[in-house]
Image: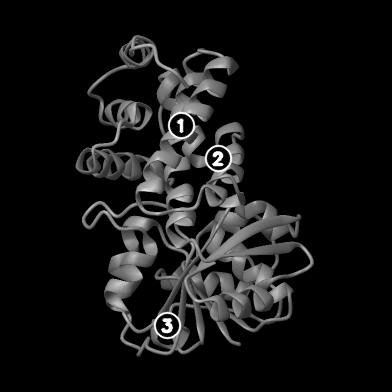
Amino acid sequence: MTFTVLGAGAFGSALAIALARGGKDVILWGRNSDHMRLMQSSRQNQKHLGDAQFPASLCATDNLREACQKEVIFLAVPMQQLSELLSKIETDMDAKVLVACCKGIDLITAQGPTGIIKQQAPKAEAAILTGPSFASDIAKGLPTALTLACASTEVGKTIQHEIATDALRIYRSEDVSGAELGGALKNVVAIACGIAIGAGLGDSARAALMTRGYSEMCRMALEFNAKPETLSGLSGLGDLSLTCMSEGSRNYRFGHALGSGHQQDETQTVEGKSTAQAAVKLAQKLGLDMPITKAVDDLVSGRIDVAQATRMLMSRPQKEE
């Protein structure tokens, strides 16, 4: 099979490196022509991955038409840019496999990434690659395990076999909704945990937020017929653990800056901000109680401060767990 990665950020570049290192010919596409020419000549993405070297079989380009000729296309752009990217692809997508690598809920449609794919490329096979992974670890060849969720068992097995490497272990699932929502909602909880540590509320508060945040993740995912075991797997609990407990997480760092009153890095994509907003609207529509998600959305939007959020969460009626 032939492979393209659309999106030359940290994760897209790292995935392209891993696939090429595993013996695949890979095209890495990005929209910035100057940046792509620099990467092709220097054989690295210095901006996002430092000195990680591109294998010889990796080609960097800004030519979208050329990039989309491959059979399997990984979509490694931020969630809120996915629809726009797909609308710009002029190549026939009918026989292709489109694998989303973004985590979130679209603000306009309230859909996950595979929903956006099906909307804009209805005859393509849609899948999602998700789980606990930092781009820097993948680029360095450190052991990483991910979930590939695809409704088609046959396609899922084929992609699983093709992209697995010595350092990249792929678990397969047919529970697309569970994988999507686990990956999306854990970013909201990571912001909450970052806020708690940044505000000096302590590790006990972080543990409580992780646990009750996980409960909210499951509550919403089950509304979409997700399987509990998916949420307790790599794309749920695994990703939640990594994102909530490491400063390598952009969502955690954003929350930490917010909680400590420091300046936030506006150049970084923080998927949890828009996901919190979209999830609150979706929860209201479904009649779901998601107080941590609501608190994060209110904090990010500036409607409340940390002290108010803490009082709100701690003063909720006592109940059985």
**Disc on the earlier residue, 3 or 2:** 3
Q: Looking at the image, which residue is at 52% across and 66% down?
A: 174
Question: Residue 31: x and y, percent?
Answer: 40, 70
How many angstroms separate mark 3 from mark 2 (CA)? 35 Å
Q: Secondary structure at mark 2?
A: helix
- Number of the label disc, if any, that sits on residue 240: 2
Up the image or down, 88 lies above or below 183; here it is below
In the displayed structure, does residue 71 sit left or right of residue 303? Answer: right
Q: Looking at the image, which residue is at 35% across and 29% down?
A: 296
Give the amino acid type for the residue marked by disc 2 in the picture: Leu
- Residue indicated by mark 1: 213
Up the image or down, 131 lies above or below 67; here it is above
Give the position of the N terminus as an image quadrant. bottom right
Q: Secondary structure at mark 1?
A: helix
How many angstroms separate mark 1 from mark 2 (CA)? 9 Å
Q: Looking at the image, which residue is at 35% across and 90% down?
A: 92
Q: Is the Cβ of the residue at disc 3 closer than 8 Å to that at disc 2?
A: no
In this rendered view, identify the residue nearer to me: 291 or 48. Answer: 291
Q: Is the Cβ of the residue at disc 3 closer than 8 Å to that at disc 1?
A: no
- Residue indicated by mark 3: 63
Q: Nearer the viewer, mark 3 or mark 2?
A: 2
Residue extending furthest toward the right: 166
In the displayed structure, does residue 295 sit left or right of residue 243? Answer: left
Residue 247 sits in quarter: top right
How many angstroms separate mark 3 from mark 1 (CA)? 41 Å
